[in-house]
Image (cartoon, helix red, strand yellow):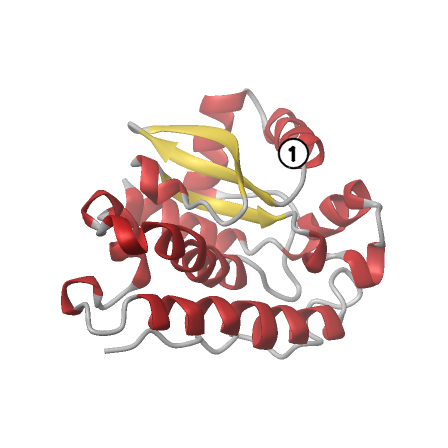
Amino acid sequence: MAYSLPDLPYDYAALEPHIDAKTMEIHHTKHHQTYVDKLNAAIEGKDDLQYDHVDDLMKNFDGVPEDVKGPVRNHGGGHSNHSLFWSIMASDAGGDPAGEAASGIDDAFGSFKEFQEKFNATATAHFGSGWAWLVLDAGKLDVISLPNQDSPLITGKTPILGLDVWEHAYYLKYQNKRPDYIQAWWNVVNWDEVNNRLSAAR
């Protein structure tokens, strides 16, 4: 069973003006599609790598044969990371978290404001291409960044919230102003889905 590109839960213009429609379309149909296609090509004929969900492939990365470890890390990670990314955004979203996410963030970081400052600093300071993540690690929430398309799942951490800071995610609208993109992105964070992910992870 080949992996496939997931449909977005909204149209390409739904996150305007914070993320523009053209960026969303290119990001989804070109970048994410390429990760899916290259992952499928890398594992063709390897039935033991055909999981129902790509996240299970990344959780079992240690068992991936050496000859395809690189492509699975890059393209499997790209598929997994983007599948999460689309799901934790929505129109008419943003604001402060509620429920389990709010209490978990307060416990781990002191307040939502302190968490947001740490996340923003991590995303801004990340050198080159990669992601900023809110992860659940051994039952505790933490903020990390990872290079390229590395998935937190490879290291046993569960991604709860992730921000793509590759230039293709923001350059059409924000050019080199990554901090402006990061600040705008908070307006589309779907805290209901973040809560769902946190509850499932726990």
Q: Is residue 184 left or right of residue 192?
A: right
Instruction: Choose top left, top right, bottom left or bottom right for residue 193.
Output: bottom left
Image quarter hosting the C terminus: top left
Q: Is residue 58 left or right of residue 152?
A: left
Residue depicted at x 65% and y 66% = 91
Q: Position of residue 139 (x, y in %)?
A: 30, 29
Q: Is residue 42 left or right of residue 145?
A: left
Q: Does residue 51 appear in the picture of this structure?
A: no
Residue depicted at x 31% and y 61% = 54
Q: Position of residue 165 (x, y in %)?
A: 65, 47
Q: Front-most of 180 and 199?
A: 180
Residue extending farthest to the top is 110
Element carrying mark 1 = loop
Q: Does residue 95 appear in the picture of this structure?
A: yes
Q: Position of residue 195 (x, y in %)?
A: 42, 48
Q: Is residue 5 above or below residue 191?
A: below
Please state which amino acid type lies under the numbered disc 1. His
Q: Is residue 175 above or below residue 79?
A: above
Image quarter hosting the N terminus: bottom left
Residue extending farthest to the front is 67
Q: Front-most of 74 and 77?
A: 74
Residue depicted at x 59% and y 64% = 90
Label 1 sits on residue? 126
Q: Is residue 145 above or below residue 11?
A: above
Q: Is residue 170 above or below residue 9?
A: above
